[in-house]
């Protein structure tokens, strides 16, 4: 969507910066040797896990969408929406580009704007809720282990957990409280009008008010389908468990087997908490540094950089590569057919 050349440049630039770190690192001479000795069965399992992760993302989006919008080939469209979200979420700070890009794609395929925004808001809340529950479970079971082995671990966790908790509180407030949403948007529109970014702010706000009524109506319809929301939560839990297992696959590909999978899943959950606070695309820098900080408990010093490279390619750059294909291969005929079928 949008400028295909720009998408391609972003992909190449992100990959180039990341790979250059390893190419010019003094340990890079042993990188090829280490990679050549990997157990590729575990790398293939990790790739399969990513495919399942993307498939579940599509299924969750699909089952939420079907509550308020039905159209021809909706599941195929849901796959496209999910992968577009993967791409734009990967290349924007705090994954902030994911929902706007998905919203744009949904409206292009005939889903009304109020419906699309409600679907994405519910999907976001489901994700954040499951992540918060997952984090609490891991903290109760594994917090002391990591706190005893990683310096300043408690501070990292408190900041990350607080940040994610605030996000879900704000999202739920906007979803439930119509008046709060209206007041906040009125303030934003007024400020944008004062600095001449938008014209006729009051007229613009009246249009937004009309959309808000439909937004909260659609959100209520989805939220009141408790079985669907519960199924979405269960699938999300499974989806992220699969994703959090990827470092374990990398670990086993190096021939190690002393650490158990639950401990490594817990390590990835804590790493995700840290990454979520980094205001760079994909948590760049923080992701690699956090992996080094936490997973050095499992990988030897001489292999940790190689492990970071492989993990990042599997769990992050695969999303950029696959998602960019869906973003760039959007044809006018597909859009026209989708609009006519809605």
Image: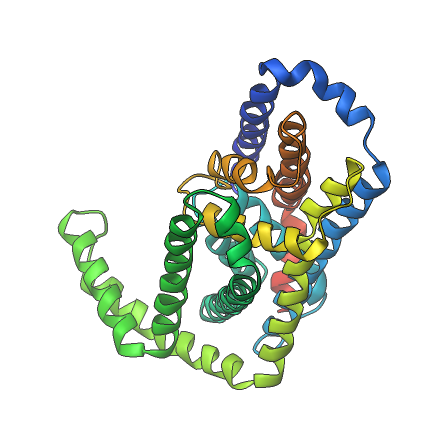
Q: Quadrant of residue 175?
A: bottom left
Q: Quadrant of residue 75?
A: bottom right
Dividing the image into 4 quarters, which one contains the N terminus? Answer: top right
Residue at image location 56% in from the left, 52% down from the top: 85
Q: Of all residues shown, which one is farthest toward the left? A: 194
Q: Which one is in front, 137 or 215? A: 137
Give the colouring mode of the picture.
rainbow
In the displayed structure, 144 sits above or below 302; it is below
Q: Position of residue 145 (x, y in %)?
A: 55, 54
Residue 45 horizontal side relative to residue 15, left or right: right
Q: Which one is in front, 33 or 327? A: 33
Residue 111 visible in the current orientation: no
Dividing the image into 4 quarters, which one contains the C terminus? Answer: bottom right
In the displayed structure, 305 sits above or below 53; it is above
Residue 214 horizontal side relative to residue 257, left or right: left
Residue 195 visible in the current orientation: yes
Q: Which one is in front, 93 or 71? A: 93
């Amino acid at each position: 969507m949008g400028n295909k050349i720009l998408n391609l440049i972003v992909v190449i630039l992100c990959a180039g910066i990341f790979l250059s770190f390893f190419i010019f690192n003094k340990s890079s001479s042993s990188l090829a040797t280490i990679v050549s000795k990997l157990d590729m069965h575990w790398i293939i399992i990790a790739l399969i896990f990513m495919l399942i992760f993307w498939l579940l993302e599509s299924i969750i989006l699909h089952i939420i969408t079907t509550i308020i919008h039905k159209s021809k080939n909706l599941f195929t469209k849901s796959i496209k929406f999910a992968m577009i979200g993967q791409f734009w979420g990967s290349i924007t700070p705090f994954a902030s580009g994911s929902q706007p890009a998905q919203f744009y794609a949904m409206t292009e395929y005939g889903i009304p704007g109020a419906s699309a925004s409600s679907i994405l808001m519910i999907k976001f809340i489901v994700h954040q809720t499951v992540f918060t529950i997952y984090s609490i479970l891991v903290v109760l079971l594994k917090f002391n282990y990591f706190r005893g082995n990683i310096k300043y671990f408690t501070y990292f966790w408190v900041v990350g957990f607080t940040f994610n908790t605030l996000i879900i509180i704000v999202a739920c407030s906007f979803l439930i409280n119509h008046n709060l949403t209206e007041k906040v948007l009125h303030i934003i529109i007024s400020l944008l009008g004062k600095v001449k970014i938008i014209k006729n702010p009051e007229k613009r706000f009246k249009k937004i008010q009309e959309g808000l009524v439909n937004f909260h109506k659609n959100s209520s319809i989805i939220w009141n389908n408790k079985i669907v929301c519960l199924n979405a939560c269960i699938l999300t839990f499974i989806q992220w468990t699969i994703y959090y297992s990827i470092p374990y696959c990398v670990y086993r590909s190096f021939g190690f087997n002393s650490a158990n999978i639950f401990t490594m899943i817990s390590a990835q959950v804590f790493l995700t908490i840290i990454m979520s606070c980094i205001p760079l695309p994909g948590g760049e820098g923080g992701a690699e540094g956090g992996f080094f900080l936490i997973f050095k408990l499992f990988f030897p010093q001489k292999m940790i950089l190689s492990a970071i490279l492989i993990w990042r390619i599997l769990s992050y750059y695969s999303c950029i590569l696959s998602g960019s294909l869906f973003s760039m291969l959007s044809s006018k005929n597909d859009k026209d057919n989708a609009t006519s079928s809605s």
